[in-house]
Image: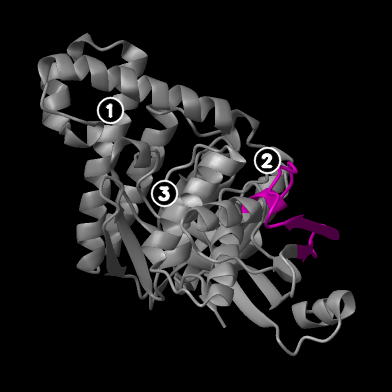
Amino acid sequence: MNISEIFSQKFGDSAEAFSIRSPGRVNLIGEHVDYNDGFVLPIAVPLEVNLKVRPRMDRRVELYAANFDDLRGFSLDNLTHQQTWIDYVQGVAHELAGASVPLHGFEGVVISDVPVASGLSSSAAIEVGAALAFLHLAQQPMAPVDVAKLCQKAENKFVGVNCGIMDQMAVAACRENHALLLDCRDYSTRQVPFRLQKHSIIVTDSAAPRELASSAYNERRAQCETGLAQLQIKMPHVSSLRDVSPEDLQQYGGDLDPIVRKRVQHVVDEIARTVYACENLEKDNLEVFGECMNGSHASLSELYEVSSPELDWLTNWARKQPGVLGSRLTGAGFGGCTVTLIENSGVDSFLENQPREYTAAMKREARCWVCTAVEGAQIL
């Protein structure tokens, strides 16, 4: 049953309804550097949250999540935490009201093929989609970068997740056939051509649980802050690890606690690696870009220690396959997804063999998607 049929079943006539598509995202390179003022390079992927909504005469929002068979609602005059997916929508309403956007009630259906809890930003997709719905009804267009900032605040303040800006920015601002180079210091962006002709991106969901990701994320952030504070004693001009070069770390990092040194080493190297990878992508040098992806995973696994047996198995297996240029974990780690750059000639064999061999080795069911770089969220 498609979204229009579900809408008609739940809400009847859809004459005034409009549709929104809001994609998930995958980060090609630049992991765990966003909170250190680094660079990230995501693309929007053709796994997306779709909304079909129509305005209401009152100030209520009623949404039916088809994936969960769950109808939820709230009053725009009384936003209270429900500890469910609807809080992402409420958080957006809260921030828009704070920005003096006149809010109108609406009702409709949400359906998604972005896997939940896989690190492909299903939460950012619903936030940005909801923001576009409210803004469309208010007849107040907003620049994608401002939509992203508002949705990040909604997740930070209302939902209570201390996420960076990358997810919402990728969902809101990515362009078709481009990767988005995002400077996490000043939120400036650059569209980098990513029109793959002889190659493809494959995203693989490891189906491994991510329970450790939240606590480890907070621990890694604290370790980075400790490393920065100690480096600032000798380098008082630096304001974040973004300002520390690999040469600086070699010269001044000798006194750091060994664990803290490893964390800082990853961040410093990953920021430099992302810039270098992007330079090569712009030259269409995909071989070097793939090598950077491999280097990123090795650093995340060995220095930052946020990989897992499942993610290491998937990336190690991928690199042995014909036509694979690079493979790495993407997202916070411990579970979630890998992203692989591969020649088109090797795609069919990869898709056939990876899930089967992964299940035999790790006793989990992996899912794979061939992804292109698609347009960010839009009203259809």
Residue 102: percent from left, percent from top: 55, 66
The residue under label 3 is: 165
Type of residue at label 2? Ala
Q: Nearer the viewer, mark 2 or mark 1?
A: 1
Mark 1 crowdedness (10 Å alpha carbons): few <14, some 14-19, many ≥20: many
Q: Nearer the viewer, mark 1 or mark 3?
A: 3
Mark 2 crowdedness (10 Å alpha carbons): few <14, some 14-19, many ≥20: few
Type of residue at label 1? Gln
Residue 76 location, quadrant: bottom right
The residue under label 2 is: 361
Q: Is residue 63 magenta?
A: yes
Q: Nearer the viewer, residue 178 or 307?
A: 178
* Mark 2 to mark 1 CA distance (whole Å): 32 Å
Element under disc 2: helix
In the image, is residue 325 above or below residue 22?
above
| Residue 204 in view here | no
In the image, is residue 266 above or below residue 78?
above
Magenta span covers which residues? 62-88
Type of residue at label 3? Ile
Residue occupying the far right of the picture: 9
Element under disc 3: loop
The residue under label 1 is: 265
